Amino acid sequence: MRMKSQYLKQSQVVKCKVCNSPAIARIRYAKINLCSKHFSEFIERKVRRTIKRYKLINEGDKVLIAISGGKDSTALLTILAKLSKIDKFEVIPLHIDLGINEYSEKSKEAVLKLVNTLGMKLVSISLSKVLNTDIPTLARKLRRPTCSVCGVVKRYIINAVAKELKVNKVALGHNADDIIAYTFKAYITQNLESISKLGPKTESINDIAIGRIRPLYEVTEKETLIYVLTNNLPYLHEECPFVSLTSLEFKIKEMFGALESDMPGIKISYLRNLVKNLKFYPEPKTKLGRCKVCGLISSNDICSFCKLTKKALGFYGGPKIMEYIRNVILK
Ligand code: SF4
Ligand code: ZN
Ligand code: ZN
């Protein structure tokens, strides 16, 4: 339903602007209709332009991408795998099995199919294998919202893998709608310090933090969906059962979707202006150092992941994750 305005019905006789064959999508902000092939090329060019415009990836870079099997990370991995051959950089897909029942099973299945299709080697970490636990159990034991626990776990594992595999960039699957929702939420809650971190990239800090990049910065949610559908990519249609459709972020997406349909192009123009003004937002004041238990980035003596696992499981999870990466993944 939500993609109706851009993904054209087969019965509509609309021609591709480039080759005159039947169009599958209308790009309203660019006032063009495109067939499957030219739509895919349009999106891939857009991502490549974002990478060049904001200097996200250099030749020889090693880029880690965490993939969940959802449409955004599926599109991102597929596009970066293509671009890596042209622009000569390396892409490493990482999958974290969170143990969220059937959702995680299906997510793993979609990811495995995708990396096989792309002929890539997957780095995979399963919470149940390494720590003998899963996200719902951790959240229950800690009596914390599931997504907040999940966020700490995913960030930690991505950092740990990035450090041990010596990658120099971590690519995130955030699309244009995500960035708009995060920044608007930050305005509404007046958490202005988080906005300075929502640009197309955040730089590495010596060897403590590895830089994040967002190659889908100007690609909308509808566009990633059309991209995976039209390329028949294996992806997980279902959302995680813990996603909240009543969250503030979701409401902001709906509101901006309505604005875009009345004023095509407003999303891209908002994002371009945001990037120009990022320097005016306050930087977070937290001092970053190393966790004294596991050695990874932390704003306290002990990192959130080590604290969280100690409280829920009775042992520090950080060193176990590091040991698994060194002894199993790197062997
Ligand atoms: Fe984790 Fe929440 Fe995302 Fe599910 S919705 S994957 S629990 S952060
Ligand atoms: Zn065409
Ligand atoms: Zn730690």
Image: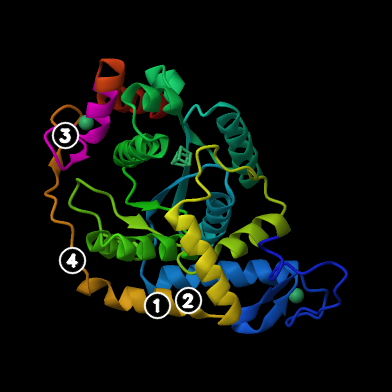
Pick the quarter of the image with the C terminus: top left
**Residue ID at (53%, 61%):** 83
- Between the C-alphas of marks 2 and 1, the distance is 6 Å
- Between the C-alphas of marks 2 and 4, the distance is 23 Å
User: Is residue 305 toward the left or the right of residue 246 in the image?
Assistant: left
Is the shortest distance between ligand 2 and the CB of mark 1 under 8 Å? Answer: no
**Residue ID at (56%, 61%):** 221
Q: Where residue 147 sits: x, y (%)?
A: 41, 39
- Between the C-alphas of marks 3 and 2, the distance is 39 Å
Q: Secondary structure at mark 4?
A: loop
User: Is residue 207 toward the left or the right of residue 12 in the image?
Assistant: left
Instruction: Kindly check if marks 1 and 4 are in contact, taking CB atoms under 8 A apart as contact.
Output: no
Residue mark closest to the camera, 3 vs 2: 2
List the residue tagged with mark 3.
291
Is the shortest distance between ligand 1 and the CB of mark 4 under 8 Å? Answer: no
Q: Where residue 294 sits: x, y (%)?
A: 20, 29
Q: Where residue 276 sits: x, y (%)?
A: 31, 78
The answer to which of marks 1 and 4 sits earlier in the sequence is 1
The answer to which of marks 2 and 4 sits earlier in the sequence is 2
What kind of residue is marked 2? Ile
Instruction: Kindly check if marks 2 and 1 are in contact, taking CB atoms under 8 A apart as contact.
Output: yes
Give the extent of the magenta segment.
295-310
| Crowd class of label 2 (few under 14; some 14 to 19; many from 20; radius 10 Å) | some
Nearer-the-camera pick, 83 or 128? 128
